[in-house]
Amino acid sequence: MKEFKNICFIGGGSWGQALAISLARAGYSSSIMVSDQDRKTILNENKSSSFPEVNFPDLISAFTTKEKLKKYDLIFITTESYRVEKTLTQLIKINPKCKVIITSKGFANNEGETFPEIILKKYKELNFGILTGPTFADEVAKNLPSAAVVASINKSFAKKISSIFFNTSLRLYLSDDVIGASIAGAIKNIIAIGAGISDGLSLGDNSKAALITRGIEETSRLILASGGKKETAFGLAGIGDMTLTCSSPHSRNMKYGMQLVQKNTNLDKSLIEGLHSLKAAKALSKKLNLETPIINAINDIINNNKDIEKVISELFNRPIKSEFN
């Protein structure tokens, strides 16, 4: 007997499609809610513009009408992070009893609130989880081995989500740290922009190793001060995802950082999650009274138009301190 009878993905981008493809390999049918008729037509013809080389399964269908959401018992939200809160509000009105998995990596708003905080404040009865980790969508779609985390306050629910992916190449580990998983997914995109800037300036491997390591330290401080578990920063959701995102221009955030140095940013900024997370991360660190020099430095470059060389110099001329506070 299957754990969930009707599975849906809100968001027809590459990640939602990749997860649907993965579930189809385990024998689960699913539907993808998309925003335009053209994409709906393409997907219902078993084609994908995101993965033209992948054999798109017959078990996946697409629709555009929001009212159809009422029939699904498990819904994955795979939209950009800035759309998640509005999507949740609409979804709960249509289908208040559904279970929800959020895969978006960012903050809920510019005040630094996480998706779990919004849910626990507004929708206390909602059974939800956070799916995050080092996963490029095209590799999951191609059935290459990957591992990620599904975090939920409800351990039984997390285990059920992991089990539906059990016979796929996507292995999901369990966590109960929804706050930590959410923050880790947001911060790694900011650090990845910094990694792109580092590579764009040819600063070397030492520079990137330092950036990732200190980026994880800032992540762990934010998680712990927000009520999450510090160790989450050192698992798949934290260092795993940050290492992946900071190591390949396959990452939109890293690619944006590289193009920023080259003064050739032709990427769609709405898809650069690190850009949307900067103000929120700054607001959160200010609220928690935490030092986050790397996040501040990247924010100065992006939002305050500070000279990159000057920002780097200021980072390296900060007062001497112990590695671990």
Image (cartoon, helix red, strand yellow):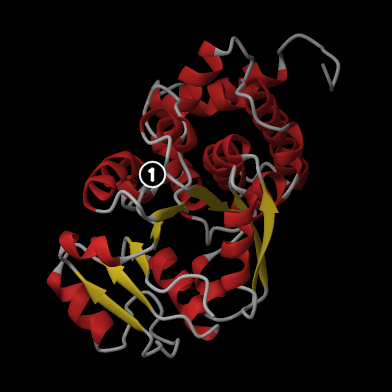
| 123 displayed left or right of 241 | left
Residue at the image position 41 percent from the left and 31 percent from the top? 118
In this rendering, the count of numbered labels is 1
**Dot 1: within a 10 Å radius of its alpha carbon, few (fewer than 14), some, or many (20 or more) residues?**
many
Q: Give the quarter of the figure containing the N terminus.
A: bottom right
Q: Which residue is mark 1?
A: 81
Residue ID at (59%, 52%): 245
Q: Where's residue 123, x and y in %?
A: 38, 36
Q: Position of residue 128 (x, y in %)?
A: 48, 48
Q: Residue at x 64, y 50 (%)?
A: 155
Compared across the picture, whether 187 is left or right of 302 comes to right
Of 134 and 90, which appears nearest the observer? 90
Along the line of sight, which residue is nearer the eye, 88 or 146?
Answer: 88
Which residue corresponds to the image point at 45% horizontal and 86% vertical from the top-left? Answer: 54
Q: Position of residue 189 (x, y in %)?
A: 53, 43
Amino acid type of the residue tagged 1 in the rendering: Ser
299 sits to left or right of 246: left
Q: Is residue 263 above or below residue 65?
A: above
